[in-house]
Amino acid sequence: MADTLTPEKWGLKESADWWSTGQAARQQIYGVATEMMLDLAGVQAGSRVLDVAAGTGESTLMAARRVGPMGHVLAADVSASMLNVAAESARKEGLTNVETRVMNAEHLTLDSDSFDAVICRIALMLFPNPKKALTEMRRVVKPRGKVAVIVYSALEKNPYHGIFYGIVRRLGNIPPPATGEPWMYALGDEGALENVYSSAGFVNVSIHTAPIPRRFPSAADAVGNMRKAAAGDLKELMSRLNETDRELAWAEIEEQFRRFEGPNGLEVPGEVLIGVGTK
């Protein structure tokens, strides 16, 4: 069983509500990496941009601010409820250059050669067929246009999740996902993201790294944040433990987080990969 959720589960309204409440925190974590992705994709004033698996729209809004009133950003996602959050955020900000559309990343119902750039943040590794999704993104971008994505780097470079997975899998005797199975770190191994890009037909493929530090007042606050999660594969994996083991897991996670505490609180390092390829 994969450590990820089906598109149907991502579409639940409670998931959208959880993602909506976490927008500010995600911006703090992924903001710098997202700007790098937009730079690498060549997003600029007047660009027509497709944001695949846009969710509640943080990367969509960042792209919309860049392209300006002469540009256009289409946010696509399997979840209508998440796209509703994105559309409302754009409306509140007065961005009239944003459109939302329910769409599966592996079957983009869009014309070929119709976008200047395509972006996808923290989603490609969760698709059942990442190559097919990237092939579709390549199809809809214009010749010499770029497709840029963000995925998590190796699990060992992301202790915020690595500690969680290690403890929960050990206590529940849960094996790691099989090779090729979609989950959060499926494209984090060296060469994996580059191989998917190349197999999808891109040229001039390059992979970049960006830090995603997570900051909390304390280890206890970090664990409290994890425990409140209403969606995602962390919750799904934890649900496989019995109640006693769940409490043991949370206590051990907090204990291991404490090694990242300092005079300014808790800072857990992390890393993402930013891939880019040209059509």
Image (cartoon, rainbow, N blue to C red):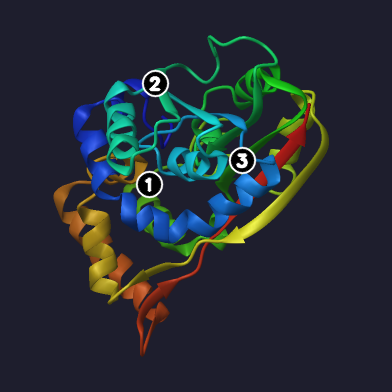
CA gap, disc 2 and disc 3: 28 Å
The percent position of residue 248, horizontal first and vertical second, equals 23, 62
The percent position of residue 70, horizontal first and vertical second, equals 55, 32
CA gap, disc 2 and disc 1: 32 Å
Quadrant of the image for the C terminus?
A: top right
Residue in view at x 64 percent, y 18 percent: 136
Dot 2 corresponds to which residue? 78
Q: What's the mark number on residue 45?
A: 3
Q: Of helix, strand and loop, which one carries label 1?
A: loop
Q: Nearer the viewer, residue 141 or 150?
A: 141
Name the residue type under label 3.
Ala
Given this view, does label 2 or label 1 mark the residue nearer the observer? Answer: 2
The answer to whether one can see residue 154 in this image is no
Hey, which residue is sitting farthest bottom in the picture?
Answer: 263
- Looking at the image, tell me whether mark 2 or mark 1 is earlier in sequence order: 2
Q: Of helix, strand and loop, which one carries label 3?
A: loop
Dot 1 corresponds to which residue? 173
